[in-house]
Amino acid sequence: MKTALITGITGQDGSYLAELLLEKGYMVHGIKRRSSSFNTQRIDHLYIDQHESHVNFKLHYGDLTDSTNIIRIIQEVQPDEIYNLGAMSHVKVSFDSPEYVANVDGIGTLRILEAVRILGLEKKTRIYQASTSELYGGLEENKNEQGFYDENSPFYPRSPYGVAKIYGFWITKNYREAYNMYACNGVLFNHESPRRGETFVTRKITMATAAIVLGKQERLYLGNLNALRDWGHAKDYVEAMWRILQQDVAEDYVIATGVTTSVRDFVRLAFAEVGVTLRFEGEAESEQAIVERVDKELFVQKVGDNAEQRISELIGKTVVCIDPKYYRPTEVDLLIGDPTKSKTKLGWVPEYDLAGLVKDMVSSDLKIVKKESYNSQWEHIVG
Ligand code: NDP
Ligand code: GDR
C-alpha cells in the first residue's frame, strides 16, 4: 500500500485527489490547518472512524508556515508521495496580503522540499508542486507558434500570488536538479467544479445563476468580463497530478484543455443552462446583462415550481452588472494552455469539456440554493 500526504486537503483539489488516491488503494494523510470552525465539508464524505482497524484516511493539524510541524508530520507519515496543494490561492486576495502569500505559497514549498531532505527521504518520497498558469501572466508575445502557453514558454507573473508561485516552481526544479529528487511541477490552468470556492469567478457565476433564477439574489456583480481563461474540471486535473508522479523520470507538465473562453461567455453559458438568454449592453463599467428570453420548458425542468411567475419577473431584468472593486491592479488577460505533452507522455485524457463543466456546476448549485438555509450575502465581500 502506498502512502500519500496531501497539503491543502480541505480545498477543492485536495478533496478530489484524496478520493482518487483512496480509490487506488493508498493510505492518505492530509494536513489541515486549525480554524475556529471545522471546515472539512469537502472531505466529510470520506470520514472514517479513527478507531477502526482499517483506517486509510487520516488528518493532521499543520500549517505551511511552520517548518517544525511540517518536518514532524513528514517524519511520522514517511510518505511515498507528497502533493503540495496548500496555498492562499485567490489571485485578487493576494494583493491584500502579499507577505502571507509569499510565506505560504513560496516558502511553504521550500519547507516541504527541505523537510524531505533533512529527513533523508530524497530517494523514497516523490513530490508534486501545484504550479499554475498564472506564472505566464498572459503576455501575448510569450505564447508558442501555435498560440498556446507550453512547458517552454517564458514566465511573467502579474500578481503577488503569481510571484510567490514562481518561487515554488523554481525551488522545486532546483531541488530536482541539485539533489536528484523526484520533484515535479504541474503547471495547471484554471480548473473548476461544484466544490470550487465561492469567490472564484466560475463558482460565483454558477451560484448566482441558481440564486437569481430561484429569486434568492437580485443581481450578480463582476469585474473584468473580457478576461479569457482555459477552464477544465478539477476531477480530471487531479488524475493528471497523480500521473505526473508515476513516471520513470521527474518532469514538469502543462495541464490544460487548449480552449479559452471569456468570463462574459461563461456567464452566458451558465444562464443558458437553465434556459435563460442574456443580452449584454453598454461599455466597460456600465456594461450589464439583461434577460432577453426564457425557454419555458427548460426553465421548468431545471428550476421547478413557480416557474411561470419567476419567468415574467425575469424578462427584461438586469441580472449582471460591473463593480470595479473586482478589477485587479494588474490583470492576466488571456490564458490558453497546450496539453500536448501531458496527453502524449502521461496519456492524460480529460473527461469533461466546458459544457459538461458548466452543467455539473449549475445543477449542483441549484440543489444548494433550493435549500431553505441558503444565504448569499457574503458573496459581495471579496472575490
Ligand atoms: P483552494 O483554495 O480550494 O484550497 C487551498 C488549500 O490550501 C485549502 O485546503 C487551504 O486550507 C489550504 N491552505 C491555505 N493556507 C494554508 C496554510 N498556511 N497551511 C496549510 N494549508 C493551507 O485551492 P485549489 O484546491 O483550487 O488549488 C490547489 C492548489 O493548486 C493551490 O496551491 C492553488 O494555488 C493551485 N492551483 C489551482 C488552480 C485552480 O484552478 N484551482 C490552477 C493552478 C494551480 P483552508 O481550507 O483552511 O483554507
Ligand atoms: P484566477 O481565477 O485569477 O484565474 O486564478 P478567478 O476565477 O479568481 O478569476 C478568473 C478571471 O475572472 C475575472 N473576474 C473575476 N474574478 C473573480 N474572482 N471575481 C469576480 O467577480 C470577477 N469578475 C471577473 C478575473 O479578473 C480573472 O481574470 C485561479 C486560481 O485558482 C489560482 O489559484 C490558479 O492558480 C489560477 O486560477 C490558474
Image: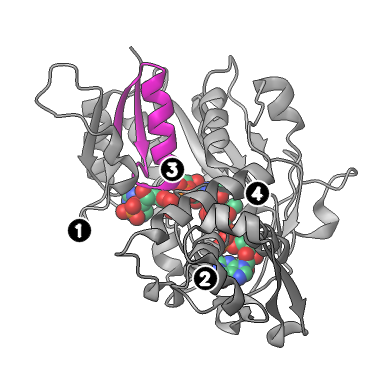
* Sequence-first tag of 2 and 3: 3
Disc 4: residue Cβ within 8 A of ligand 1's nearest atom? no
Marks 1/4 in contact by CB < 8 Å: the verdict is: no
Which mark is on residue 212?
2
In three-dimensional space, the C-alpha distance between marks 2 and 1, rounded to whole angstroms, equals: 29 Å
- Boundaries of the magenta span: 3-30
Q: Which residue is mark 1?
A: 37
Q: Mark 4 belongs to which amino acid?
A: Trp
**Position above or below: 241 against 219:** above
Which mark is on residue 182?
none
Q: Nearer the viewer, residue 382 or 368?
A: 368
- Report the residue at 32% width, 31% height from top: 118
- Report the residue at 72% width, 54% height from top: 335
Asked if residue 274 can be seen in this view, the reply is no
- Report the residue at 53% width, 69% height from top: 92
In three-dimensional space, the C-alpha distance between marks 2 and 3, rounded to whole angstroms, equals: 33 Å
Q: Residues within 10 Å of mark 2 (few under 14, many from 20)?
A: many
Q: Which residue is mark 3?
A: 85
